[in-house]
């Protein structure tokens, strides 16, 4: 028998929706909660979907809850705010699995609070984007006590492929921030390289095909450049969310008095993209900054 027959999921956005599909596919009954209830109505297998009125209501059906929310304030409000989880009928077996990408410091504070009450808590941010969420192939960076991570494993296996226990509470978020700062820097290096090469007269699809087999290859080139070439900037992973992640890296480094030169520059570039109104576009829209400066577009 599966360890958790019913599981709560709060946040069915770009990522949470795909995770919901795979939890249903694995046979779970889903106790779904999103301020946008349209997201829940879109799900198949409605006979195994319970719509919770709010976070507290989720606990009327199950004590195991996954959160997949934008940022730290959303997770804190769902946990401690009005009609938050902790205002509900919290049993001693309450288990929170936060798969959002949020601040490692806030994660550790949440962990300390929940552990003090005898509850279980794991951070499990993900990488792999919308396609990884839809296909159940996410990489999951878990942080927490070994026994809690093992308990979360059947759920992680339902939505992910590459599941790594990174260390104590917050360690998953630390690794996620590290990954995000690299992918942001790679998006900028790709934007600069392709603007330079295209303006110098070489077709961008040729540059892409070469770099995919060269030492400059990265997710930005392999996964995002095909979208740029088609002029497709629909998210995906938004500039707003990626800016949030780069800012988490900047804040962490500031707290540790650690100079991170490229990360701080990239944070300003992402902020510029937000100011220009690209916040709700896919993160590959960062190339538009360079297209505007160079007077060319990187398209097929
Ligand atoms: P999203 O904005 O598409 O989804 C968030 C969902 O949470 C929305 O449906 C929203 O209505 C809901 N929500 C917000 N506040 C709520 C509340 N108080 N109660 C209930 N529901 C609430 O975001 P996303 O792209 O799915 O990202 C979720 C997390 O995963 C973020 O932390 C993001 O950084 C991370 N992430 C995203 C991607 C990606 O490619 N989109 C990839 C890896 C990690």
Image (cartoon, helix red, strand yellow):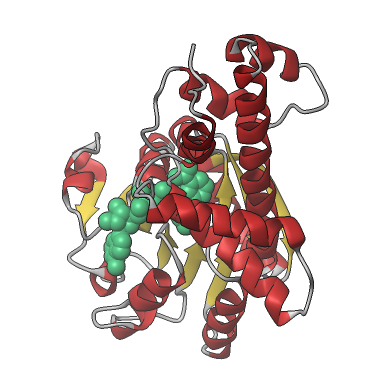
Out of 237 and 275, give the one closest to the viewer: 275
Quarter where residue 35 is shown? bottom left
Give left or right: position of 1 versus 9. Answer: right
Picture coordinates of residue 127, whole percent (x, y): 58, 44
Quarter where residue 36 is shown? bottom left
Against 280, residue 137 (above or below) is above
Out of 84 and 24, give the one closest to the viewer: 84
Picture coordinates of residue 126, whole percent (x, y): 57, 49
Residue drawn at (48%, 42%) of the image: 283
**Marker count (numbered):** 0
Out of 159 and 273, give the one closest to the viewer: 273
Quarter of the displayed picture in which ligand 1 can be seen: bottom left
Give left or right: position of 295 versus 81. Answer: right
Against 112, residue 264 (above or below) is above
Is residue 209 in sight in this rendering? yes
Picture coordinates of residue 284, whole percent (x, y): 50, 36
Residue drawn at (77%, 79%) of the image: 257
User: Farthest residue toward the bottom?
Assistant: 116
Picture coordinates of residue 141, whole percent (x, y): 65, 54
Give left or right: position of 145 versus 30. Answer: right
């Amino acid at each position: 028998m599966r360890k958790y027959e019913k599981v709560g999921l709060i946040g069915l956005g770009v990522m949470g929706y795909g995770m919901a599909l795979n939890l249903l596919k694995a046979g779970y009954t889903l106790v779904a909660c999103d301020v946008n209830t349209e997201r829940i109505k879109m799900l198949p297998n409605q006979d195994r979907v319970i719509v919770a009125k709010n976070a507290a209501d989720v606990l009327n059906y199950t004590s195991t809850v996954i959160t997949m929310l934008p940022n730290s304030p959303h997770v804190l409000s769902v946990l401690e705010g009005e009609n938050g989880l902790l205002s509900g009928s919290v049993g001693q077996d309450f288990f929170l699995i936060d798969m959002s990408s949020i601040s490692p410091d806030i994660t550790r504070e949440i962990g300390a609070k929940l552990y003090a009450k005898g509850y279980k808590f794991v951070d499990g941010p993900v990488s792999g984007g919308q396609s990884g969420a839809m296909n159940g192939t996410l990489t999951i960076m878990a942080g927490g006590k070994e026994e809690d991570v093992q308990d979360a494993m059947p759920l992680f296996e339902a939505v992910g492929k590459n599941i790594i226990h990174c260390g104590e509470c917050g360690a998953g978020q630390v690794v996620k921030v590290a990954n995000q700062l690299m992918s942001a820097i790679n998006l900028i290096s790709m934007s600069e390289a392709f603007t330079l090469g295209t303006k110098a007269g070489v077709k961008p699809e040729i540059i892409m095909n070469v770099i995919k087999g060269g030492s400059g290859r990265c997710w930005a080139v392999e996964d995002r450049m095909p979208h740029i070439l088609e002029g497709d900037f629909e998210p995906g992973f938004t500039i707003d969310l990626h800016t949030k992640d780069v800012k988490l890296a900047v804040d962490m480094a500031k707290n540790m008095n650690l100079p991170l030169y490229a990360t701080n520059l990239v944070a300003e570039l992402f902020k510029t993209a937000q100011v220009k109104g690209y916040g709700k576009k896919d993160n590959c829209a960062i190339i538009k900054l360079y297209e505007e400066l160079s007077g060319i577009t990187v398209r097929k």
